[in-house]
Image (cartoon, rainbow, N blue to C red):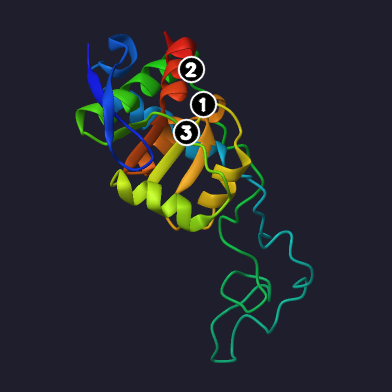
Amino acid sequence: MPKTTVYDMTGKSVGEMELSDEIFGQEVNANVLHEVVRAYLANQRQGTQSALTRSKVSGGGIKPWRQKGTGRARQGSTRSPQWRHGGVVFAPKPRDYTIRVNRKVKRVAMKSALSGKVQDSELIVLKDLDLKEAKTKEMVKVLDAVKAEKALIVLPESNENVERAARNIEGVKTTLVGTLNVYEILKYKSLVLTEASVKKIEEVYV
């Protein structure tokens, strides 16, 4: 069963915490991580892009000039792709980019991502995270104390002071256990959890 050091907000070690082997001690499955991240990014696409093909562009019904004898290349329409204001070759049209992933596969990917953070020593557990004021400099002090860089802070429940204090820090994002996803875990170098967040994650994924 993996263990991790628990820190307070000043960066001082206040003990150790045992992590669930079923969630934080799994072998990292790179193929599943790739599948889930690919699906996540694809599902963010709106699929609303659209351009006109030569058949949809208005005009161009008359032949610009006669076929032979002008010395110029033959042209059949002023709406051909090579003309200014002409149609687009293989124009994009609205489509659905959704990729569906099985629930079991998503769970395996989540456990792999969390286990990878433990194995790479990129998981930081805080005793608690409760700022008295929503001050950015206070949040910076906490992150510097625990040596967290490009951090994803996972909260067990909404905390307005923490969220407001962290939102102006470049490379730092806050999220809730309920909205945690594999892509963001992998995107950010440090994963910062509170003890309450760890317990809540273990309740959800065990």
Q: Give the secondary structure at mark 1.
A: helix
Residue at (59, 69) in percent of width and height: 81
Marks 2 and 1: in contact by CB < 8 Å?
yes
Q: Which residue is mark 2?
A: 200
* Residue 133 position within the rendered picture, expressed as x and y whole percent measured from the top left: 58, 49
Q: Which residue is mark 3?
A: 154
Few, some or many residues within 10 Å of mark 1 (<14, 14–19, 20+): some
* Residue 173 position within the rendered picture, expressed as x and y whole percent measured from the top left: 48, 46
Residue at (59, 84) in percent of width and height: 68
* Residue 57 position within the rendered picture, expressed as x and y whole percent measured from the top left: 74, 65
Few, some or many residues within 10 Å of mark 2 (<14, 14–19, 20+): some
Residue at (71, 59) in percent of width and height: 55
Q: If you read the primary sequence from the N terminus, does the residue marked by circle 3 or circle 1 appear first?
A: 3
Q: If you read the primary sequence from the N terminus, does the residue marked by circle 1 or circle 2 appear first?
A: 1
Quadrant location of the N terminus in the rendered image: top left
The three-letter code of the residue at mark 2 reads Lys
The three-letter code of the residue at mark 1 reads Val
* Of the pair 60 and 138, the residue shown nearer to us: 138
* Horizontal side of residue 153 vs 69, given as left or right: left
Residue 115, picture quadrant: top left
Q: Is residue 57 above or below residue 195?
A: below
Q: Which residue is mark 1?
A: 177
Q: Give the secondary structure at mark 3.
A: strand
Label 3, label 1: how far apart the Cα atoms are: 6 Å
Marks 3 and 2: in contact by CB < 8 Å?
no
The three-letter code of the residue at mark 3 reads Val
* Of the pair 35 and 166, the residue shown nearer to us: 166
Marks 1 and 3: in contact by CB < 8 Å?
yes
